[in-house]
Image: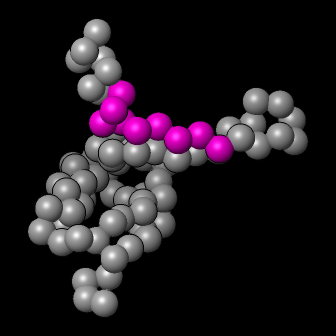
Amino acid sequence: TNPAPICVLDEVDAPLDDANVQRFCELMEEMVRVTETRFLIITHHALTMSRMNRLFGVTMQERGVSTLVSVDLDRAERLLEAS
């Protein structure tokens, strides 16, 4: 289909400085507004993570045992506003 329903981007923000990461995030937000494409962005950049709706991660609280973690940032924000 066109546009693609899902787009996976792996560490595309890694070589960017903070100003360009902001531009990248603004571009992603605009693309989400005008298309029905869902973006899965793999990143370690804090600025990119702070602009996303949901975060997924893997943590290892004890050696050899990985745990998947999911945080809905929009919902967390609403909970903070309500309290």
Whole-percent x, y for residue 28 in the image: 23, 61
Residue depicted at x 40% and y 38%? 72
Kindly identify the residue that appears in the image at 38 percent across and 73 percent down: 6
Q: How many numbered discs?
A: 0
Q: Residue at x 87, y 42 (%)?
A: 64
Q: Quadrant of residue 4?
A: bottom left
In the picture, the quarter occupied by the N terminus is bottom left
Q: Residue furthest bottom?
A: 1
**Left or right: 39 with respect to 30?**
right
Q: Which colouring convention does the figure follow?
A: one colour
Q: Residue at x 76, y 30 (%)?
A: 61
Note whether residue 20 is visible.
no
Q: Magenta includes 37?
A: no
Q: Is residue 68 left or right of residue 30?
A: right
Q: Position of residue 10 (x, y in %)?
A: 48, 66
- Residue reaching furthest to the top: 83
Closer to the camera in the image, 7 or 24: 7
Q: Where does the C terminus fall, quadrant-wise?
A: top left
Residue 9: x percent and y percent? 42, 68
Q: Is residue 42 above or below residue 19?
A: below
Q: Name the spot of residue 50 as percent of width and height, x first.
A: 34, 39
Span colored in magenta = 68-76
Q: Nearer the viewer, residue 18 or 79?
A: 79
